[in-house]
Image (cartoon, rainbow, N blue to C red):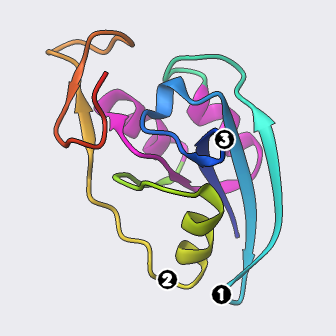
Amino acid sequence: MIIAVAVENGNVCPHFGHSPSFSFYEIEEGKVISEENIQSPGHGHGILPEFIASKGAKVVIAGGMGQGAVNGCMSYGLQVITGVQGSADEAALLFAKGELISSDSICYHHGEHHEHGHSCSSDKCSH
């Protein structure tokens, strides 16, 4: 199985739509067997779900994610795990072991889906 982690400076990016890159991990039998970091094709929620799905990922992990991005990911059959902090590699390993749990940290954009000036439902994502 391939999973995607939103990455910023080696850590899980606090906001999916602003992630500078994504690391794609191949998971097999509870272990990470390969990893490839790919620069984001651009900022914004619209193009990212298609990009991630095109790489064969079945799961996407991020710190926070807006409802529009969640819906976009789900439309591509991606499982969404949010509220994750710390090392991207550690998050992938925890997922492989079945120990990573989503906190459902969904970012709310004041009634609109835009990229700046939003607040989130948890302290993990504040811009």
Give amino acid for label 1: Gly
Based on the picture, tell me whether residue 52 belongs to the magenta stretch: yes
Give the residues in magenta: 48-76
Distance from disc 3 to disc 1, alpha carbons, whole Å, reads 21 Å
Q: Report the residue marked by disc 2.
A: 98
Q: Which of marks 3 and 2 is nearer the N terminus?
A: 3
Q: Report the residue marked by disc 1.
A: 30
Badge 1 element: loop
Give amino acid for label 3: Ile
Give amino acid for label 2: Gly
- Counting from the top left corner in percent of width and height, residue 47 is at 60, 22
In this view, the mark in front (3 or 2) = 2
Badge 3 element: helix
In this view, 32 is above or below 85: below
Q: Residues within 10 Å of mark 2 (few under 14, many from 20)?
A: few
Q: Residue at x 49, y 26 (%)?
A: 17
Q: Which residue is drawn at 65% across and 87% down?
A: 30
Q: Report the residue marked by disc 3.
A: 52
Front residue of 2/72: it is 2
